[in-house]
Amino acid sequence: MARIVKCGLIQASCPWTPPKHSLKDIKKRMIDKHVAMIHEAGKKGVQMLGLQEIFYGPYFCAEQETKWYDTAETIPGPTVKLMRGLAKKYKMVIVVPIYETPSTGTYYNTAAVIDADGSIVGKYRKNHIPHCAPGFWEKFYFKPGNLGYPVFQTRYAKVGVYICYDRHFPDGARILGLNGAEIVFNPSATVKGLSQYLWKLEQPAHAVANQYFVAASNRVGVEGPWKIGEFYGQSYFCDPRGQLIKVASPDKDELITADLDFDQILEVRKVWQFFRDRRPETYGELVQQLP
């Protein structure tokens, strides 16, 4: 019998931004919005669900202001506690990207992975941190991740996480495959511009090279007051052959679902023996420092 798992991705706009709304109000409204969509996912029988990058607010890296530090939380903390209850209620694995502060004055772009029984099986901290114009000032807010590229055994599948800008680096994507990932969730916040044509190119390439599923989520809409561009949605699932299975709209809040057959991973690997034919003893240059 095929090992089929119903998976879901949520993409959502954030129409509430400062100074019209307080940071506390924005956070509550976005959490409430996502909770309603998680209930929808639960009623549809979704077993594994991914949320977008730092889902409970706007993409605040469009400016450099210390006030956003106040939106960070610990793991576990109030938002993860709420998600643990929903995961347990619906027997659903949930990937929950938040702004994490594990200690005073230390901040990471992190995703907690919650299992179907409500337990926290682990977390991933974004490793590659961009800092570029216009409006992607992430080094002001995040330390580079220090947890490597873990893979989490959940009730339904082995889960890896890559966050947004990470997707431009094939090295970590490879490690996730070597560590046994069957599906990699990539929560993102990316706007129209130079990288849009890469959105449906890079991650299917990771899926092919490593023969796992990819679940890529992006937000939608234009977020004021910064208006750095339009978040173009198009969240999608990709199979180990690099084929897009389900793609969301470019401009509306949406929950997309797909039935993924995880037996397909072995089927593809029997054809393409990429892991067998690797030559790691010849790759030393990859880890040498540039002059």
Image (cartoon, rainbow, N blue to C red):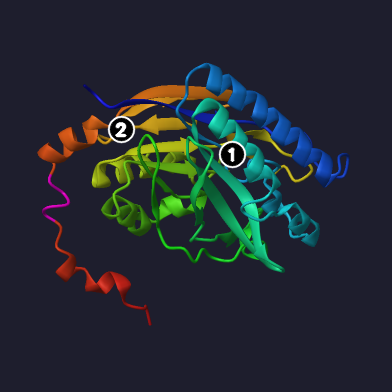
Q: Which residues are magenta?
A: 273-277
SS for tag 2? loop
Q: What residue lies at 66% left-to-right and 29% top-to-bottom?
A: 35
Looking at the rendered image, the quarter that the C terminus falls into is bottom left
Mark 1 to mark 2 CA distance (whole Å): 28 Å
- Which residue is at the far right? 20
Q: Main secondary structure of the magenta part?
A: loop
Residue type at mark 1? Arg
SS for tag 1? helix
Q: Position of residue 207 (x, y in %)?
A: 30, 41
Q: Position of residue 56 (x, y in %)?
A: 68, 41
In this figure, which residue is indicated by the disc labeled 1? 84
In this figure, which residue is indicated by the disc labeled 2? 239
Looking at the rendered image, the quarter that the N terminus falls into is top left
Q: What residue lies at 15% left-to-right and 70% top-to-bottom?
A: 281
The answer to whether residue 205 is left or right of residue 66 is left
Q: Is residue 14 visible?
A: no
Number of other residues with Cα within 10 Å of mark 2, as a class: few under 14, some 14 to 19, many 20 or more: many
- Which residue is at the far top? 44
Residue type at mark 2? Asp
Q: What residue lies at 31% left-to-right and 77% top-to-bottom?
A: 288
The answer to whether residue 153 is left or right of residue 30 is left
Q: What residue lies at 48% left-to-right and 61% top-to-bottom?
A: 127
The quarter holding residue 67 reads: bottom right
Residue 189 — which label? none
Vertical comparison of 185 with 287: above or below: above
Of 205 and 70, nearer the camera is 70
Going from N to C along the chain, the mark reached first, 1 or 2, is 1
Q: How many marks?
A: 2
Vertical comparison of 139 with 178: above or below: below
Q: Position of residue 65 (x, y in %)?
A: 78, 59
